[in-house]
Amino acid sequence: MNTVPKSVSKLSRQILTHPSLHWNIWTIGVIGVAVLIATPILVVLSSIFTNQSETWEHLATTVLPTYVINSLLLMLGVSVGVLVIGVGTAWLVTMCDFVGSRVFEWALLLPLAAPAYLLAYTYTDVLDYFGPVQTFLRGVFGWESATDYWFPNVRSLWGAIAMMSFVLYPYVYLLSRVTFLEQSVCTQEASRSLGCNPWQSFVKVALPLARPAITAGLALALMETLNDFGTVQYFGVPTFTTGIYRTWFGNGERLAATQLAAVLMMFILSLILLERWSRRQARYYQTSSPFQRLSTYKLEGVRGLLAWLSCCLPIVLGLLIPGALLVQMTLENMAETLDQQFLPLALNSLLLATLTAGLAVLLSLFLVYGLRLSGTPVMRFGVRIAAMGYAIPGSVIAVGILIPLAQVEGAIAPLLQNWFNLPGSFLQGTITALIFAYLVRFLAVSLGSVESGLAKIKPSFDDAAHSLGHSARSTLAKVHAPMMGGSLLTALMLVFVDVMKELPATIVIQPPNFDTLAVRVYRYASDERLVEAAAPALAIVLVGLLPVIFLSWQIAQSRLRSTD
């Protein structure tokens, strides 16, 4: 029996385990993931170059101007709301000392746990004609009908702006506060030595330096605004997301819906360019340690009370009031809201969220580690493409996925019908398609956390592992992954919660007879059955609080470390 010479065997092992071969394998994998993530986006963008149908021409001359105007007004209103609340509260808790300021540092993030559509449902129940607020006012002032007084209609554009502002301002608050903490103590002291009062120091020094971070937070908030479906649909505000859904399912015009999605992407791309441009302006230097404690302004009396109210109201309006109402409705109507359907709905949501979060973390780890092995321009470009899905609204991603899946079904269905008894739609409207949509949208969320965790591990650990004979995969599994436990857990938790709250993509791709908590809340609320929607809505809020509380705890710990 012939045997392979030891020298040849050793050479073969060296070739197979050579780092460059692993890099090629990682590169191919990263590019493959990037292509999958980019496919729905490219499908939507390609619709711009297709022949315009009569339905699209009708939409362009009738409802498209309304969609554009309402979307712009919504963005404008939410911009004002999140900037005033986010920047104002960030400055107060960072640079001022008043009663409760240390608690507000982390508590101001809590409204991020509640989706805007849940606030829309609860505040409608409170502020409608038969709600407790108007009923109380009629009892106090003796009004007998709606003609005797005027009360603002919450189901309106301004109502949608208010709901979104209450839950999206934490994006601006978080980035603004981090920037205020990192600003140079010398810069602040110089402004004071030149006679600037607190307001002048804020407007002339702190605000210009924080502009890039504020713009980045604002861009995130506006992307979520354009992604919203439940709030604007419930309030009857026609926007691109409601138009896409109505055109797709109401009129059955997939091409026109895709072209509407392409127009919506133009808004998103504009926001991305704005955010990138703002980052290029972030070229200033600090002359002191960011951990050097800033001297704060002591606020007492009326000023302290106003500061306390300014920080307390967003929390009360954005979380405590809707949360308390959901708890009350759930406890008072246990039999109706915690019915036999609640547990299957919760299990469906948990299944989708768990599978998506696990896959997202694995893919993120693969992408980031591949980039660490080979930081070539091709790898960097692939990872950047894979991370762009978060900027795209869920409704757009859903449309971009269903179109190619329908084409694939049409091509292979005749071939498979002879061997398998397949349903009419075996790719569209499936759990696989839905998880794919979630991955396209939320992969960037886990990617950021995993990337930051891996960046903290020194390259010397890689060299030590390789010197001991570990391959790239072995190093990742036995060295890096255990050291990144906190980052991986954070990524898993963030994606899990985002999937639990996601509504637009779920509504469009929803498998038959497979409801989730978010879909059931939407359907119950649309039928004015808010009592039945209470328990599913409360479950979404409670799950959403987990990463927010974790992030708040980290902020509190960083504050303690910075003052040591």
Image: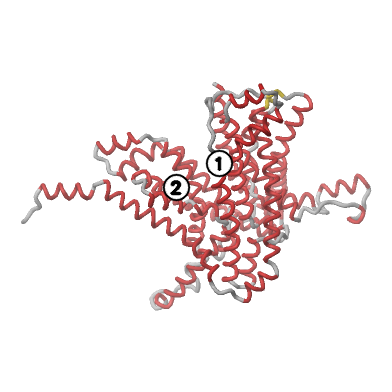
The residue to which callout 1 is attached is 281
Left or right placement of residue 52 versus residue 423 in this view? right
Looking at this view, is 526 or 26 the one in front? Answer: 26
Q: Is residue 109 above or below residue 294?
A: below
**CB contact under 8 Å: marks 1 and 2:** no
Q: Residue furthest left?
A: 1
Circle 1 residues within 10 Å: few <14, some 14–19, many ≥20:
few
Q: Is residue 561 visible?
A: no
Q: Is residue 125 visible?
A: yes
Looking at this view, is 47 or 558 the one in front? Answer: 47
Q: Residue furthest front?
A: 194
The residue to which callout 2 is attached is 361
> Where in the figure is residue 215, as x and y percent of width and height?
60, 44
**Residue 178's image quarter?**
top right
Q: Residue at x 39, y 77 (%)?
A: 415
Q: CA distance from mark 1 to mark 2?
A: 32 Å
Looking at this view, is 545 or 46 the one in front? Answer: 46
> Where in the figure is residue 400, as x and y percent of width and height?
52, 64
> Where in the figure is residue 452, as x and y percent of width and height?
45, 39
Circle 2 residues within 10 Å: few <14, some 14–19, many ≥20:
many
Q: Residue at x 60, y 60 (%)?
A: 264
Query: Amino acid under label 1?
Result: Gln
Q: Secondary structure at mark 2?
A: helix
Q: Is residue 218 above or below residue 243?
A: above
Q: Is residue 170 above or below residue 58?
A: above
